């Protein structure tokens, strides 16, 4: 709310400063030029200096702060100090004018200041105290000075001035309250919208996780991986290797120690696979203790070398709450486009290569070949 109030105050500041400058110049020089009252000239220079400082403050705020997360309270303080001092300067001028004997100049001054007091109700509505203080200070001191004069016409002007100051005080208070309530509702709605957006984002993420991620390992599930692999097979212009990974010794741990220990092994295996690959979308838990991973732009020799490194990584011991457990990994490889060009066929061939290798020697790597396919025929 404070930031919004500052934006409102500074947004109207340039027009207010310009009106004050124009009005003060007219009132000081229009009636007695070229023999300007020395005290009025001193007052005008003081007002010019004040308005210049206020303009520089507005300019600095617009350049440095307007589109940033600025301190709203500090900006409001800077603005209101300048505005309230301006009001006091106008009060001094009006009080001084009441001591003069120029009815036309005095009347013109009161009309001009009353007009500025009327405009302040809207321009300063962003800050309640300043909105009420400004018209009262502009009009009340001078109006009291007129009431103390001996002329009935000036006393009447004083009564009118005080009455107008009271009316403006009430109007300014209502305008400031309305503005404050509007800003409150704006920010409350923003908070509500942000909260709803966060809930929608959270639910969307939840739906995404339920439909695409394996709940235990948080890797892609079959559906999501197949969709991604299909896209790759249909659009890839470079060879890649699909690895079918099966953990060795996992069933023994699961059956003898329990599913809790098995789940720990699966989660830690997933973490190691995540560390090993750059493209997390080309990695999945296929089911049970089986995982699939794709290495892009990879030939057979490179795929074998990476598979050996992966087996070494996955075979490192896992520390659990009560013990240190170890599993191995057997890997089967199918190459695109050498062995197959569709996602389903690549997975089938890598699966064959893995099972064949598991029968030959666990915790090693094997590449699909036509001889393997004949054995499974």
Image (cartoon, rainbow, N blue to C red):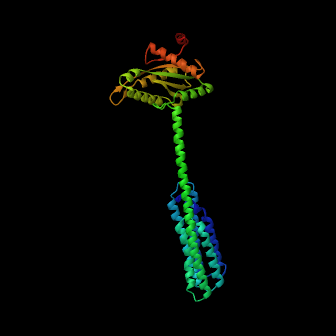
Relative to residue 358, is residue 53 depicted above or below? below
Which quadrant would residue 8 be assigned to in this image? bottom right
In front of the other: 242 or 206: 206
In front of the other: 302 or 354: 354
Where residue 72 sits in the image (x, y, percent)?
Answer: 52, 59
Where residue 321 sits in the image (x, y, percent)?
Answer: 34, 31
Where's the C terminus, which quadrant? top right
Relative to residue 311, is residue 114 depicted above or below? below
Q: Residue at x 55, y 82 (%)?
A: 144
- Residue that lies at the very extreme toward the bottom in this rendered image: 150
Where residue 1 sits in the image (x, y, percent)?
Answer: 53, 58
Q: Residue at x 53, y 28 (%)?
A: 282
Q: Is residue 300 visible?
A: no
In front of the other: 85 or 326: 326
Relative to residue 26, is residue 60 depicted above or below? above
Question: What is the number of callouts on the image?
Answer: 0
Where residue 277 sits in the image (x, y, percent)?
Answer: 50, 29
Which quadrant would residue 36 be assigned to in this image? bottom right
Q: Residue at x 54, y 43 (%)?
A: 200
Q: Is residue 351 visible?
A: yes
């Amino acid at each position: 709310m404070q930031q919004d109030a500052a934006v409102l105050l500074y947004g109207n500041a340039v027009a207010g400063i310009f009106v004050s400058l124009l009005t003060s110049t007219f009132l000081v020089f229009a009636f007695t030029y070229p023999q300007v009252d020395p005290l009025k000239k001193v007052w005008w220079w003081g007002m010019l200096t004040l308005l210049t400082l206020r303009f520089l403050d507005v300019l600095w705020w617009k350049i440095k702060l307007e589109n940033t997360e600025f301190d709203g309270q500090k900006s409001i303080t800077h603005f209101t100090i300048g505005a309230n001092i301006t009001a006091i300067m106008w009060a001094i001028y009006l009080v001084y004018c009441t001591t003069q004997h120029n009815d036309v100049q005095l009347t013109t001054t009161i009309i001009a200041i009353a007009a500025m007091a009327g405009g302040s109700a809207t321009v300063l509505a962003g800050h309640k105290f300043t909105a009420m203080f400004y018209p009262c200070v502009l009009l009340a001191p001078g109006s009291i000075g007129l009431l103390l004069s001996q002329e009935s016409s000036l006393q009447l002007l004083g009564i009118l001035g005080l009455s107008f100051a009271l009316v403006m005080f009430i109007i300014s208070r209502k305008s400031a309250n309305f503005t404050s309530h509007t800003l409150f509702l704006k920010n409350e709605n923003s908070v509500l919208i942000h909260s709803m957006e966060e809930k929608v984002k959270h639910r969307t993420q939840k739906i995404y996780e339920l439909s695409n991620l394996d709940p235990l390992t948080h890797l892609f599930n079959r559906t999501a991986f197949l969709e991604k692999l299909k896209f790759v097979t249909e659009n890839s212009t470079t060879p890649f290797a699909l690895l079918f990974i099966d953990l060795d010794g996992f069933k023994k741990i699961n059956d003898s120690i329990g599913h809790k220990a098995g789940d720990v092994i699966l989660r830690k295996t997933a973490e190691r696979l995540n560390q090993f690959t750059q493209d997390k979308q080309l990695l999945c838990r296929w089911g049970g203790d089986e995982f699939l991973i794709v290495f892009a732009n990879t030939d057979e020799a490179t795929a074998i070398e990476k598979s050996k490194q992966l087996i070494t990584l996955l075979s490192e011991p896992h520390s659990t709450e009560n013990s240190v457990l170890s599993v191995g990994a057997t890997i089967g490889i199918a190459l695109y486009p050498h062995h197959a060009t569709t996602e389903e066929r690549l997975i089938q061939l890598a699966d064959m290569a893995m099972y064949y290798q598991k029968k030959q020697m666990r915790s090693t790597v094997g590449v699909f070949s036509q001889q393997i396919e004949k054995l499974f025929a």
